Image (cartoon, grey):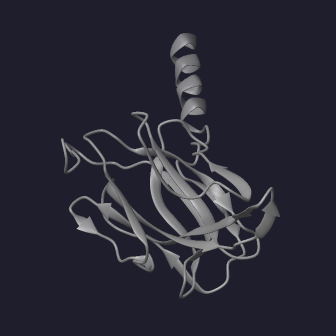
Amino acid sequence: MFSILFVTVFLDSCLAMPIKDPYSYSSAVGQGGGTPFASYGEGRITGVRVWETNNNNYYYYYYYYYYYYYYYYYNSIAYISGFQLRYGYTWSPVFGREGGEKQEMELFNDEVIVKVSGKYNPADYICYLVLSTNMGRTLSAGLPNQVSFNFYPANMGNELRLLSGHFNGAGITSIGAHWGLVYMEGAVNVTS
């Protein structure tokens, strides 16, 4: 009788334990001017597109040395102009704009995004964006300069659910990551 009471009290206390929140948020980085956005869709993220703009500026400096004229200088400014996520078979709207060079990655079955990192200029745009998967693949766009950021889920087993932030007419001015679990029975990604 005492053992039944003990087991009942023990099981009741286990059920009363708080359940850890399965969602987490990595706070946005960047100056954040412009229109707010939050990607959305049903199911797991199955693809990513990122557009980068490179403004390559050439400045010429001339100097004279031993009867020869030399000139050189190169300055490259790159930033993320837009991105798009695919949920299942459906692409989200483009956040930002489709300008510049496009990078694209389709995820394999059971492949999920587990890290978002990059660099941002506190005065204007996200300069560099890297999306890493649990299978070791990455998609990167932009140039790695300015201030670094690294976003990870707070809980084991979580994956990227959506990206949020701000954009203006030229590009992405801030970005944050939302992590969580996807509960899908018999779900598979679009590609194999």
Q: Which residue shows up at 68% across the image and 53% down it?
A: 149
In this rendering, the count of numbered labels is: 0
Whether 66 is drawn above or below 1: the answer is below
In the image, taking residue 44 as reference, residue 166 lies left or right, namely right
Residue 78 drawn above or below residue 169: above
Closer to the camera, 48 or 162?
48
- 99 or 19, nearer to the observer: 99
**Residue placed most toward the observer, 100 or 1:** 100
Residue at image x 39%, y 44%? 112
Residue 27 picture location, percent across and down: 67, 61
Estimate the x, y position of residue 118 in percent, counting from the top left.
Answer: 61, 54
Residue 143 in the image: above or below residue 169: above
Q: Which quadrant of the view contains residue 90?
A: bottom left
The one of 60 and 192 positioned closer to us in this rendering: 60
x, y percent for residue 148: 71, 53
Q: Quadrant of residue 55?
A: bottom right
Question: Is residue 69 depicted above or below 26 in this figure?
Answer: below
- Which residue appears at 34% of the width and 40% of the height? 111
Which residue lies most toward the front here? Answer: 67
Q: Quadrant of the C terminus?
A: top left
- Which residue is pictured at 58% across the width and 69% down the height? 79
Dividing the picture into quadrants, the one containing residue 58 is bottom right
Judge left or right: residue 98 versus residue 35: left
